[in-house]
Image (tube, grey):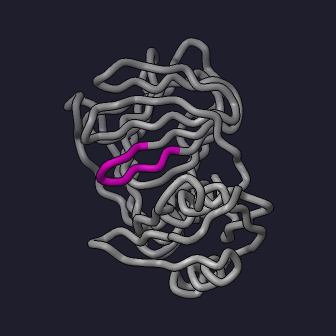
């Protein structure tokens, strides 16, 4: 069953002989199973486009927003996700999350291997690793990433356990859809243990500021956390 707020539009794209289905989520997450058995979980405000039936040679879908994929393995038909006009993610069978904003596309791998390709080249990602593509610089980078909150939108909560503030603000930015930054690396080294579920942004920031004895300042659309920092 599909959540309320999801709608379908039959659209013919790329190959005029192939019927494409568009699924858009509005105010809540949605889960669906594709023709090959692969599962997709869409975060609220995201969109997935896929053919009614995959071809004999490939499995291609297109998305915007945030989605978690658990892809059924098929070595004869690679699975490819197109994100915007610059990034493609190719796998044979694995599980991973894609998150897209205006300036950044991230791919985090839960299991298996993923190839992330962009205008500046391509990188291979293993389980636990994250690839980042900065759209304004056409820059593709790879890094190791802890996984505790990568599927927070599925679980419905953010859980931090002695987590560096640099990682906390990254997850908060994705969770609340705002840009939050630490003022410097010293502040970013501070660690915190806390949990957020239904709290609004103001409450979450207040908890962090009070716990770590920080200050917050909004400049433009960005919120900066500042203070004495940690060794």
**Of 50 and 210, the residue lying toward us:** 210
- Displayed quadrant of residue 119: top left
Percent coordinates x, y for residue 12 in the rendering: 23, 40
Is residue 115 shown above or below 193? above
Residue 198 vs residue 133: left or right?
Answer: right
Percent coordinates x, y for residue 57 in the rendering: 44, 15
Residue 114 vs residue 90: left or right?
Answer: right
Residue furthest to the top in view is 76
Is residue 88 shown above or below 200? above
Looking at the image, which residue is at 38% across and 55% down?
47
Give the main secondary structure of the magenta stretch: strand
Looking at the image, which residue is at 39% across and 36% down?
133
Whether residue 170 is visible to the viewer of this picture, yes or no, is yes
Percent coordinates x, y for residue 49 in the rendering: 37, 46
Q: Where's the C terminus, which quadrant?
A: bottom right
Residue 21 vs residue 150: left or right?
Answer: left
Residue 140 is covered by the magenta coloring: no
What stretch of residues is rendered in magenta?
98-105
Q: Where's the N terminus, which quadrant?
A: bottom right
Residue 99 vs residue 21: left or right?
Answer: right
**Of 91 and 120, the residue lying toward us:** 120
Whether residue 2 is visible to the viewer of this picture, yes or no, is no
How many numbered discs? Answer: 0
Percent coordinates x, y for residue 61 in the rendering: 40, 37
Looking at the image, which residue is at 41% across and 40% down?
52
Looking at the image, which residue is at 52% across and 81% down?
201
């Amino acid at each position: 069953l599909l959540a309320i707020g999801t709608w379908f539009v039959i659209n013919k794209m790329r190959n005029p002989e192939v019927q494409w289905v568009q699924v858009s989520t509005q105010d809540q997450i949605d889960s669906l199973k594709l023709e090959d058995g692969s599962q997709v979980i869409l975060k609220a405000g995201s969109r997935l486009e896929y053919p009614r039936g995959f071809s004999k040679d490939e499995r291609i879908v297109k998305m915007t927003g945030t989605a978690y994929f658990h892809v059924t393995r098929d070595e004869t038909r690679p699975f490819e996700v197109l994100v915007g006009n610059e990034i493609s993610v190719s796998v044979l069978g694995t599980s991973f999350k894609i998150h897209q904003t205006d300036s950044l596309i991230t791919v985090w791998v839960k299991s298996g291997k993923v190839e992330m390709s962009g205008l500046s080249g391509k990188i291979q990602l293993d389980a636990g690793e994250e690839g980042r593509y900065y759209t304004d610089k056409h820059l593709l980078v790879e890094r190791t990433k802890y996984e505790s909150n990568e599927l927070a939108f599925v679980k419905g909560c953010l859980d931090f356990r002695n987590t560096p503030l640099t990682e906390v603000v990254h997850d908060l930015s994705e969770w609340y859809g705002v840009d939050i930054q630490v003022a410097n690396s010293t502040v970013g080294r501070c660690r915190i243990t806390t949990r957020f579920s239904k709290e609004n942004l103001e409450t979450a920031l207040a908890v962090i500021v009070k716990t770590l004895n920080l200050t917050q300042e909004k400049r433009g659309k960005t919120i900066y956390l500042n203070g004495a920092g940690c060794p």
